[in-house]
Image (cartoon, rainbow, N blue to C red):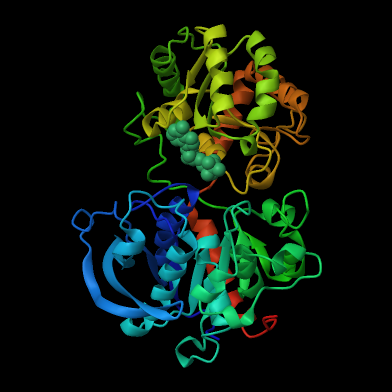
Amino acid sequence: MKDRQPLKILLLSAEVVPFAKIGGLADVAGSLPKAIRALGHDIRVAMPRYGRIDPQRFGLKEVLPAFPVPMDKQMEEAAVLQGSIAPDIPIYMIENAKYYDRDGIYMYPDDAERFIFFCRTSLEMLKRLGWCPDIIHCHDWHTAIVPNWLKTIYKDDPFFAHTATVYTIHNVAYQGIFGYRVLEIAGIGEYGFMHHPEMADLTEVVDLMARGIFFADVINTVSETHAQEILTPEFGQKLDPLLRDRRERLFGILNGIDYELMNPATDKYIAQNYDVNSLEKRVHNKLALQREANLKEDAAVPLIGIISRLTDQKGVAILGDVIDHVLDLDLQFVLLGTGEPHYHEMFSRIAQAYPGKAAIFLTFNAELAQKIYAGTDMFLMPSRFEPCGLGQMIAMRYGNVPVVRATGGLADTVKDFDPRTGEGNGFSFVPYDRWALFATIVRALENYKYKDTWRQLQMRGMAADFSWDASARKYVDLYYHALAARGKEAEPS
Ligand code: ADP
């Protein structure tokens, strides 16, 4: 094992900012490497070269001409292009027209095959490049097969003799569940299904995330609280028995936010730049937002914002149950989000029922999002579950006070304000219950009346460090831990 020497790390992800993004995974895969590199490690990234990624625009150059990759019982050709995420961080793009030359990224019937090919090519590519990583860092179901391979078909391969795996779960709800055929395509048919006494399903399906959890040297999810939550049936999405077995290898590391992009002092989208020393200027963003959103211009009225996917996960159901009561109070409300059609209907009704008081934008708009972070007083996230959550961290960076349900990463980042001690940086509630949400909004509104108190809350959020630096150090510790844990592994069953 290397003792705190600089490491070589290959990060595998199906999405990476700025090349292809569907969700938060892309943000992590695009920004974590920069922070790891800044700590002195040689980190490189690999992803598929989807049809929508223009090689010219990103200056991609062929680094490996077409070579054969084992797939199923045959060989399939792949080439590798190379670009960069930052000056010292190469990104390898796996090229194969049949699998990736399509309009979208996911949701194809052969997704299992497409991502198995991506993973297999990435491993074979390393040998051809002669670059042997200490760590392969896999993310979500798309790359979960890699730890499985390193303990089976690559077990005796001297090239990978010292390589350890880290498996990061961003959302345990998406596991990559397929049939037996996938094992044959991956070349591990002879090992058959997995077996677990408390997970009967595993003898009938191939659950790729379960394999990542079972075979990786260490596992993590994206907040400490969520790492505990997924050990329970309530949050584990049926993987909790396996996660409990592996709990000694399971960790929680909070995602960071990009402090350069998310900066009220330089943000190009907002009406008035400001920082913690010029918080009084922030009100101009509120007035500009009220104008843009057709709300009554009023610096004093509390303005609540929400930016969210409109899904059950985000607690939109309990919000919908009390929204009329909330809008009876003396406040304004602005929502930006897209999601399930019944929630679109619900908020369309709200927009009609409360003109001048509630502004509803049922669209995806990155520019408007920044205006809402900078222009609202409170930021609402009543999530049912939340592995990490970025919105509350961005809000605090912008001097916006979060009102959240204490679950997952929200519990780790937002501490409920206690007027007796003056401690806390926002407002939170525990039971997933409409009246608990309502009471917490009321509590936030009461405190909003005390300008000094409120200013303290704003400043505390702005002073907190939610940058990647602290989390990247924890990932580096995790990498060393994986190297130490390697070899002390259960044999495949
Ligand atoms: P999740 O990844 O589960 O959707 P997060 O809070 O981790 O939730 O990240 C959501 C990110 O997407 C935040 O940066 C938020 O500002 C942004 N976002 C969500 N919905 C929209 C939207 N409709 N328009 C613009 N940005 C959005």
User: Horizontal and vertical percent for residue 284?
Assistant: 40, 18
**Quadrant where the N terminus lies?**
bottom right
Q: Please tell me whether residue 342 is drawn above or below residue 234 in the rendered image.
A: above
| Left or right of residue 428, residue 398 in this image | left
**Quadrant where the C terminus lies?**
bottom right
Q: Please identify the quarter of the rendering in which residue 304 is found.
A: top right
| Left or right of residue 196, residue 183 in this image | left
Q: Could you tell me if residue 155 is visible in this image? A: yes
Q: Residue at x 54, y 83 (%)?
A: 3
Extreme left residue here? 56
User: What is the total number of numbered labels drawn onto the structure image?
Assistant: 0
Q: Please tell me whether residue 245 is drawn above or below residue 155 in the rendered image.
A: above
In this view, the residue in front, 270 or 284, is 270
Q: Please tell me whether residue 355 is drawn above or below residue 42 in the rendered image.
A: above
User: Horizontal and vertical percent for residue 42?
Assistant: 39, 73
Q: Could you tell me if residue 276 is visible in this image? A: no
User: Horizontal and vertical percent for residue 88?
Assistant: 31, 67
User: Horizontal and vertical percent for residue 53?
Assistant: 28, 54
In this view, the residue in front, 73 or 52, is 73
Q: Residue at x 58, y 25 (%)?
A: 342
Q: Residue at x 44, y 53 (%)?
A: 108
